[in-house]
Amino acid sequence: MNDTDTPAKTAAYSVVPGDMYDWSDLTGTRPLPRGPVLTRFAVATASGASHLLVVGPHDLDLLDAAVDAAATTTVVVRTHADADLVSERYAARSVDVVCGDLRAWTPDRPVDAVLALDGLGRVATIDADPADWQAIAEHLAGIAPGGSRLALVVPNPGSPLAQLRAVTPEASDDNADWSFPVHDRGNPLSLADASARFAGRGYTLWPDVDSPTLAAAPEACSVALAVAHGRPADTPTLRELQPALGQTLDTLGAAAAAGGWLVARGLAPVPSVLGVDRTGDETSWTAADRSWLIEAMRDSARRDASGLRHHVRRLRDAVAGAPERWCGLQVDEIGLDADQVVPVHESTVKLGESADEILLGLLDELAAYLCVAGWRHPWPAGRGRDELAVLLAATVDLSVTPAEVRRVRQRRESSLSSNGMAPVVAGRQAPQDADPSELRKLMAENEALRGQVTWFKQQMRQRQTMTHEVRTAARRDVTALNSRIKELEDQLSARQATSMNRVARRATAVPGRARAGFGRVPGARRAARVLRRVRAALRRLARR
C-alpha cells in the first residue's frame, strides 16, 4: 500500500520517507480541527510569521485563515491524497506541501511559528515502528526552537467525557481509523504537564478537542465548564458525565475533566475564556474564580439545601442590586469572584423586565439543568422543572405558581429566538416527573425512618411505664420508712427518760393516793361533808 523505500518528488509537493497511499486523513471519518475557537488560535499563531509550519491534517477553512496570515507556509501531511488536495488548493499562494512522516522531515529554513491543532496522532506513518507522543514531541521541539510561536493540541487520555465516546480499535482494517493511540506513557497527563513540555500557556478545550466551543486558562476552568455545559452542540456534552463529574472536580479539578488541552506559546494576548456565543460568533467571557452554576449544582447533588439556598439568595441580592446587568444573561454566564456573584458575559438581549422576573428566569434555567442532567436535589419529589423552579423561588420568599414560571420561560425563549439565539436547554425535553428510581429509593428510606421512629416511641412508652412504677414503689417505701422512723423516735424518747422524771410523776400522784387512802377511814367521809357545809355557811355570812 505504501512506498516508503523509494521517496519521490512531484511538481506539486515534496515527498519524504513515510508517505502513504490510497487513503486520506482529510476526508476520513475522524473529525478535523475546526471552529471559531481554534481558528482564533491559528490566526494568532500565523499572524506576522515569516515561516509557518502546519503539522498534520486541519480543516481547510481553518487552514485558509492561517495561510492568509503568514508570509510563507509549509504543510506536512502523511498521505498523497491529502498532499494533492492541499497543493492544488494553494497552488497560487506561497505554500509548500510535504508528504510523509514528520520525523523524516527537516526544514531548509527556520520555522518561527508551528500550528499543530490536530495533535500528534496523525503525523507519523503506520508502516514504521510506532513512536510514542514524547518522541514526536522532541522532534517537533527541535524544528521549532523556544523563541517560535506555537499552538499545539494535546488530548486528555483521562477525560471522563472522552471515555464515554467510542474508542477506535488500534488494529482496524478501516484506513480512516489508522492512527497512533494517545493512551501511551509519553502523553502529558495534566494541563500543567502539557504546558511545561513546551514552556507555554495552557488552555482547556470544551467539550472536545476537535471542535471546541470554549478554551479556558487554568484560572477560569470552572466558568468554562459551566458555559460549555450549556452550549447547544451535536457532540456529547458534559452533562453526560454527571455521575463521575462531581468526584472528578473535587479530586482532580475542572481541567482534568476536559477533553484535551491547547498549549500556546508566544501568541498575542488571548482572553482567559474564549469561545462562541449562542449565535455561533466568537466572543469572550470574564474570568471568575468559580462558576455559580457549578457550585449550585454541586450543592444540589449533595442535597445540601442550606448551601443551595445560600447560592440562590446571593443571586437574588445581586440581581436586585443591578437588574440591568442581568437582564440579558443566562444561568451558565454567572461567576463567583471573591465570593461576589458577577456576570461573566455582556449581553444586549433583554430577557426580563423586573428583578423578580429576571431572577425567576435564571432559577427556571437552573431547574432545567437539574432535571435534564438528572442531578439530585434537596426536593426530589418535585414533579419536573416547573415545580422545582417554584421551590427554588420559595427559598428566597418569591411566591410563584408553575403557570407563572411557564409564562416567564416563554417570554425569555421568545426573546432569544428573535435574536437568533438558543436557550441553554434548547431541544432537550426535561422529564415532567421525578426519577422513579430516586422516588423508590426515597420511599424505602422513608419507610425505614418510620420504622425507627415507631421503635423509639415504643421504647419511650416502656421507659415511661417503668418510671411510673418505680416512682409509686418509691412513694410507698418513703411512707413506710417515715412511720418506722416515728416509732423509733418514740422508743428512743422513752428510753432517754431519767429517774427524776419518774420521781416527779410519783410525787404528783401522792395527793390523789392520800385522798383515796383517807376515804377508806371509817367516819371520814361524813366529817368531810360537815366541814364543807360549815365552810359554805361562813362564806355566806362573809358576803352579808
Image (cartoon, rainbow, N blue to C red):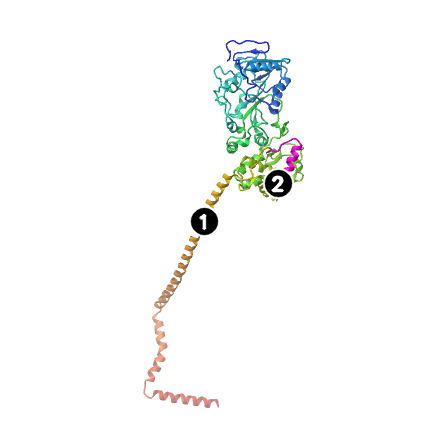
**The residue tagged with tag 2: helix, strand or loop?**
helix
Q: Earlier in the sequence, mark 1 or mark 2?
A: 2
Q: Is residue 212 above or below residue 49?
A: below
| Amino acid type of the residue tagged 2 in the rendering | Val
Which residue is the site of mark 2? Answer: 405
Rendering coords of residue 163 (x, y %): 50, 27
- 414 part of magenta stretch: yes
Rendering coords of residue 404 (x, y %): 63, 42
Instruction: Residue 465: name its quadrant.
Output: bottom left
Front-lying residue, 118 or 415: 415
Q: Nearer the viewer, mark 1 or mark 2?
A: 2
| Amino acid type of the residue tagged 1 in the rendering | Thr
Rendering coords of residue 479 (x, y %): 40, 62
Residue 409 visible to an observer of this rendering: yes
Which residue is the site of mark 1? Answer: 454
Q: Is residue 460 above or below residue 394?
A: below
Instruction: Residue 526: name its quadrant.
Output: bottom left
Front-lying residue, 54 or 134: 54
Instruction: Residue 466: name its quadrant.
Output: bottom left
Q: Dot 2 surroundings within 10 Å: few (below 14), some, or many (20 or more)? A: many
**The residue tagged with tag 1: helix, strand or loop?**
helix
Residue 320 visible to an observer of this rendering: no
- 50 part of magenta stretch: no
Residue at coordinates 62% horizontally, 42% vertically from top-left?
Answer: 403
**Magenta residues (range):** 409-425
